[in-house]
Image (spheres, rainbow, N blue to C red):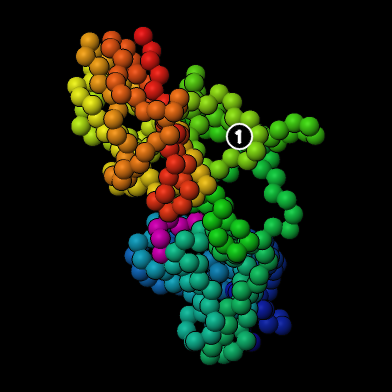
Amino acid sequence: MASTYTPLGVELQATGENAGTWGTKTNTNLQILEQISGGFIQKSIAGGAQQTDLAVSDGSTGAELSHRMIEFTGTITGNQVVTIPLDVQTFYFLRNSTSGAYTVQFKYITGSGDSFTFSATNKGDALVFASADDGTNPKILTINTGIKSVVEDTTPQLGGNLDTNDNNILIDDAHFIGDENGNEQIIFQTTASAVNQIDVTNAATGNAPSVTATGGDTNVDLSIAGKGLGRVSLGAGAIQQLTEKATIAATAATGTVNFDVITQAVLYFTSNAAANYTLNIRGDGSNTLNSIMDTGESITIAHLVTQGSTPYYNNAVTIDGSSVTPEWQGGSAPSAGNASSIDVYTYTIFKTGDAAFTALAAQTQFA
């Protein structure tokens, strides 16, 4: 009786066969078994869409399918299918080291049994079992051993605190840290070649935590802004080292001067006033003061008007184009400007209701 072979190529010698070569064949069988139990091979599947059949090599070592771990390599330009014969029963460690965004499927050569597929982005490892459980449609069973690749786990969960081990967490532009419901809490925006950033520092008992601008520049501003006309609200306490936005313009006061409180808190005209003028106080060209203030809020602004030898003054005040009569310091409105001076007009405006305002005003000469 002639020898037979297992699906993985091990020779089963018949009784009394192979006189004089029995030892050599036994040694080859042992080498095949060693290869099956712990062998490693790299198999190139480079190329376009194709099927690559891993064949058995009866009675000799080197059969690709008779290795415990198979690493697929090469640049692929189409989806790949790798097959084994219908009767192979063993388990494999598979590694997808190909380059190219295409799938790699591992399956039996024919039949409709289950198979395993590396997705186009999965360049990781897999543990599969070739079951040979059916003569026509055997299954390739996937053995789950936990996370194969972080990128493949679309709903990862930590079992404990994440320690970065003296490394950093890198976040793509316009991506966020969310709450437990998946809603955005902090969205990070990136700037190419950024050198400045913020430091967030906690504090021990009796000390204040801080959010501080830091970076490569000597002086680094910290910008905090609401969306659109949204405000920045600060709790009770002291505000230190605060400046207000001022606009300095080589403009002469005359006609109607629009004071846009969204743009600045102080408006300084450096050219000599040319005529008595109306000051119209508004949000800006697109927003009314009424729309950006809530009832019970106030705002204080200053208009600096340069005067020549013939002085002029602010003889009318409007808010959002509607006339108001300020309450003037000293009890009466000014009737003239101050020659060769800078007249500073300050206005504190209280919103008392919808489109209802009380204005307190003062004129002060600086010379």
Report the magenta stretch's main SS.
loop
Q: How many marks?
A: 1
Indicate the position of residue 186 as horizontal and vertical percent values: 55, 49
Relative to 43, is 336 above or below? Answer: above
Queried whether the magenta region covers residue 85, the answer comes back as no
Q: Residue at x 40, y 60 (%)?
A: 101
Q: Report the front residue among 135 and 59.
A: 135
Residue in front for this viewpoint, 121 or 246: 246
- Residue 126 location, quadrant: bottom right
Q: Position of residue 11 (x, y in %)?
A: 64, 75
Q: Which of 285 and 319 lies nearest the eye of the viewer? A: 319
Q: Secondary structure at mark 1?
A: strand
Which residue is at 19% across, 22% downward?
274
Q: Is residue 103 left or right of residue 136?
A: left
- Quarter location, residue 20: bottom right
- Where residue 8 appears, as percent x and y from the top left, is 60, 74
Which residue position holds label 1?
A: 211
Can you see residue 312? Answer: yes
The kind of residue tagged 1 is Val
Whether residue 46 can be seen here: no
The relative height of residue 366 versus residue 227 in the rendered view (above or below) is: above
What x and y, as percent, mark residue 147? Answer: 64, 62
**Range of residues picked out in magenta:** 94-102
The quadrant the C terminus occupies is: top left
Other-residue count near label 1 (Cα within 10 Å), few / some / many at <14 / 14–19 / ≥20: few
| 214 relative position to 77: left or right | right
Identified at 37% across, 38% down, the residue is 325
Q: Is residue 188 left or right of residue 249?
A: right
Q: Nearer the viewer, residue 59 or 88?
A: 88
Picture quadrant of residue 169:
top right
Q: Quadrant of the N terminus?
A: bottom right
